[in-house]
Image (cartoon, helix red, strand yellow):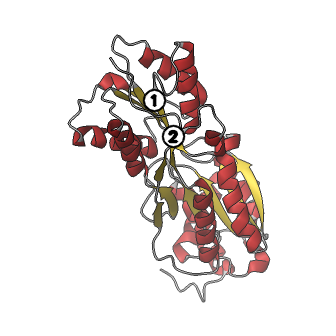
Amino acid sequence: MADTSRVTLAEIAAEAGVSLATMSKVLNGRTDVSPATRARLEEHLARHGYQRRTSAQRSEFVELVFHELEPIWSMEVIEGVEDVAHAAGLSVVLTVSGDRHSPAPDWIDGVLRRRPVGVVLVFSDLEARYREKLRSRGIPFVIVDPAGDPSPDVPSVGSANWSGGLMATRHLIELGHHRIAAITGPEDMMCSLARVDGYRSAMNAAGLPIDPELIRFGDFHPGGGEHHGRELLALPDPPTAIFAGSDLQALGVIAAGSAAGLRVPDDLSVVGYDDIALSRWMSPQLTTVHQPLRRMGEEATRLALRLADGATADTLRMDLATHLVVRDSSAPPPPR
């Protein structure tokens, strides 16, 4: 790599065959530069490892990016990010963009113009070209609860999803349930697969058969939980317990049980995942796996700020522990 202590923007511009004015437009996220020229300059900037070095060149805020704002779940992460940012004298800018895999293409130009101190993203990964653009500007980024399997060089903070699925299912087994269903999240999300893998491991360890018909991939929303719950409870041999991969899905499952004339937990046990505030106010109060959403937001922001200060992270991947919270929605199965 070139000696970044000596290289200048003028030299990089000359090497790329463009004017310094064009280089300035790219650095400032202007849109009046052709995609081909922008890509060429980004390549040269990345090769030289050029980064902005002074805080005066960036705004004093952290940017938090979601693909959707689910008010209850998202608020936990937002509050964690805000706590750490405010303690550092920074504000938080909230952006909604793209899908669960990555922000939309126009997001990168906007964030380069805004120049935040750091970026916290709730996505599965960040495309390599976006990562290089952010790094070339000295804008650190961290992914929270990656739904996929982020690249090894991507800083990320997640939780122990496999252990959470294991604990939820083991709890139901210990209550005496044998016919246990699992409704996890989308099949293309790593956290969904990890939670259902924990379910399978608990069933295998207990010597219980795993019926593929009892494993469903949902969407983490109440509607998905209700849809799959209705289908599961309409089976000739329905489950006596359902592990839902999110508290919101668990809410849908309870609605499906009520529609089928079942009482929770007398006739059907339900365990959720996340431990959002609503889980303590549902009727019955929800047994669930506590996922430290707020702390995940806190740790991601702390890491982004450390990277912004030029520190080297001890590890780029942090998985926080989950634990089971037993409340009123789980009980022994009804007698047969």
Residue underneath mark 1: 269
Q: Residue at x 51, y 33 (%)?
A: 329
| Residue 280 appears in the rendering | yes
Q: From this viewpoint, which residue is outermost toward the left? A: 207
Quadrant assignment, res 135: bottom right
Q: From this viewpoint, which residue is outermost toward the bottom? A: 6
> Which mark, residue 334?
none
The secondary element bearing badge 2 is classed as strand
Q: Residue at x 55, y 61 (%)?
A: 131
255 left or right, relative to 18:
left
159 left or right, relative to 32:
left
Q: Earlier in the sequence, mark 1 or mark 2?
A: 1
Of the 4 image quadrants, the one containing the C terminus is: top left
Q: Compared with residue 294, is residue 254 higher up or lower down, i.e. above or below?
A: above
Position of residue 132 measured from the top left corner of the image (x, y, whole percent): 55, 64
90 left or right, relative to 272:
right
- The foreground one among 259 and 21 is 259
Please, what is the three-letter code of the amino acid marked with disc 2? Answer: Thr
Q: CA distance from mark 1 to mark 2?
A: 9 Å
Residue underneath mark 2: 287
- The foreground one among 66 and 53 is 66
Q: Compared with residue 141, is residue 126 higher up or lower down, i.e. above or below?
A: above
Q: Are marks 1 and 2 in contact (CB under 8 Å)?
A: yes
Position of residue 233 measured from the top left corner of the image (x, y, whole percent): 44, 16
The secondary element bearing badge 1 is classed as strand
318 left or right, relative to 86:
left
